[in-house]
Amino acid sequence: MESRFTTLLCIFLLLILPLMGVFMRLAEGKIHISDDLDDVIDDEEDDDWKEWGKKKTPSDDEFDPPKLDFDTMSLSQIQEEMMRKQFGPAFGFVKLRLGSHRTPDMVSEIAMQWTRVLKTGALDVKFMGVDVNTVMFTMQRGQDTIELKEYILNQPEAYEIKIGDQAFRRPGDPPLDDLVEKLRREENKNNEDDDTGKSKDEL
């Protein structure tokens, strides 16, 4: 039994000793990698690797001015064509439907929901609640405003989207100022009717 143990120990030491020699040479510093890398050719970095992480700027070939006859186009067609060719960031406001009671938390929830949905559609838009009737948005790529406009006008909570000086509504919806004035007149009429009913009761 002892002879077998001795034999196994000898075999183990014979296998381990060469590895120990390599580790000793590494510890002594005999294997040295030079810091002089002038003769090393690094051809692994291609152009895509060098551009990785940098913000892309619109190049001249991306800008393709429209070959359109503006004399025959309506103002809305010209504005839509200009929106399609807009580069750079854009911002604007979404007016929510009037007449619904909302809290600031509800408006924040709507803004978060719209941000998440548009992010899944590869539109980098951030919405923020301003007040209980208004949501502000910012977007990095101005050429995506048409898709944004279409999405917002399909949302039941939205009444109007304003991008720059342009306001967009669903077809047939009156301008927001007209709607506010109409609601104010109805409210005043209701208040007058209440006052008239009270005075009759007092008589």
Image: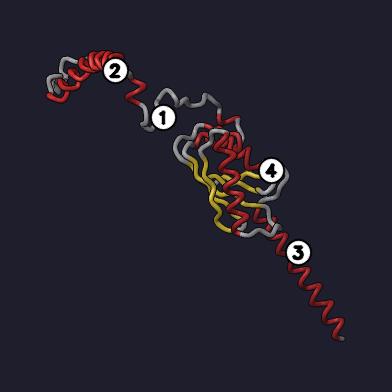
Q: Residue furthest bottom?
A: 203
Residue 52 placement (x, y as % from top left): 36, 27
Q: Which residue is denoted by mark 2 in the rendering?
A: 2
**SS at mark 4 in the image:** loop
Q: Given the image, on which type of amino acid does mark 4 rest?
A: Arg
- First in residue order: circle 1 vs circle 2: 2
**Above-or-below relation of 149 to 93:** above
Tag 1 residue: 58
Q: Quadrant of the C terminus?
A: bottom right
Q: Which residue is mark 4?
A: 170
Taking depth in this image into account, of 21 and 155 the one nearest to the observer is 21
The residue mark sitting in front, 1 or 3, is: 1
- In the rendered image, the residue lying farthest to the front is 1
- Mark 2 and mark 3 lie on one chain; the one further toward the N terminus is 2
How far across and how far down the image is residue 133, in percent? 62, 56
The residue beneath circle 3 is: 186
At mark 2, the secondary structure is: helix
Q: CA distance from mark 1 to mark 2?
A: 81 Å
Q: Is residue 38 above or below residue 102?
A: above
Give the quadrant of residue 81. Answer: top right
Circle 3 packing at 10 Å, graded few (<14), some (14-19), many (20+), is few
Q: Residues within 10 Å of mark 1 (few under 14, many from 20)?
A: few
Q: CA distance from mark 1 to mark 3?
A: 51 Å
Residue 159 spot, x, y in % from top left? 66, 49
Question: Is 95 on the left or on the right of 18, as rendered?
Answer: right
